[in-house]
Amino acid sequence: MNKWGKLSLGMLLAVGLMTGCGNNNDNAASTDTNAGNTGTAAKTLTLGTSADFPPYEFHKVIDGKDTIVGFDIDIAKDIAADMGAELVIKDLPFDSLLNELSSGRVDMVISGLSPTEERKKAVDLSDIYYKAEQAVVVREADKDKFATMDSLKGAKIGVQTGSIQEDIAKGIEGAQLTSLGKISEIVLQLNSNRVDASIMEGPVAKSFVKNVKGLVITDAKPEVEDDGYVIGVKKGNTELLNQVNTTLTRLNSEGKIEEYVAAASELAESE
Ligand code: ARG
């Protein structure tokens, strides 16, 4: 190999290292669309999400391959397609997502994100693309015991770290919180009697009680101020925010979001 051959190989490696940095959990949505690319850098759109949240975003083996799917992912794919960009998905802890956004390690966050005043200050948020209610999940035998929000006073409650459910639980008198990184860990805690109840989004609760024997949704109804989900971009990234809202408007008018929710719910329930 001559000197220039070595140099360009070195450059390629360097670029590979830079773009590959911290990408251990990445799951490129499109496969090798850049193969044979002759030089122009392909535009990528990097999504940050916490893929522990069926039917919004979750792991599923598809054609023998671990894949991140869900209706948030479908929306992300449409945004990327409308931009002519390749979607790159990073599966990250929920409580790290907004920092990753601010530091530019991801371009947008779609992760069943609820708009809160605090988050509005930290990042820019899109229009609301979907709404759902909150639910309380308990062991079957406790269904009647925890039928109201009042009955959760003093209970052991499992919630996701950094979520609005953590705030809801903090507001319950005497509640003992267990904050965990992943919803699946909370479900395990419930199953093994280490927590009494968990608060989560209704669609997520439904998907877990379908798949995990012995858990049910109670009649208790946690109230939230800002219901609905939004997409986050880095503060000041108006160009991407406008693109996101344009795509959301299109998807809404075409009835696509309801379609994606239905398909993802089915996928979350199938083996
Ligand atoms: N909607 C809640 C929030 O914004 C929980 C979202 C959790 N998302 C996830 N992919 N685990 O705080």
Image (cartoon, rainbow, N blue to C red):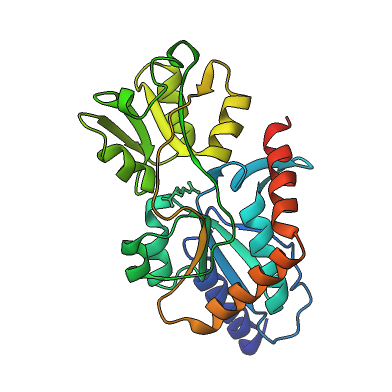
Up the image or down, 221 lies above or below 12; here it is above
Q: Quadrant of the N terminus?
A: bottom right
Q: Position of residue 207 (x, y in %)?
A: 61, 33
Residue pictured at 54% horizontal, 43% vertical: 53
203 with respect to 157 (left or right):
right
Residue pictured at 57% horizontal, 71% vertical: 16
Q: Is residue 91 visible?
A: no
The part of the image, by quadrant, that contains residue 221 is top left
Q: Of all residues shown, which one is farthest toward the left?
A: 174
Q: Position of residue 113 (x, y in %)?
A: 47, 56
Residue pictured at 20% horizontal, 29% vertical: 174
Q: Of all residues shown, which one is farthest toward the top?
A: 141
Query: 176 or 149, which is in the foreground?
Result: 149
Q: Quadrant of the C terminus?
A: top right
The part of the image, by quadrant, that contains residue 90 is bottom right
Residue pictured at 67% horizontal, 37% vertical: 268
Q: Position of residue 212 (x, y in %)?
A: 57, 22
Q: Position of residue 266 (x, y in %)?
A: 73, 38
The part of the image, by quadrant, that contains residue 30 is bottom right
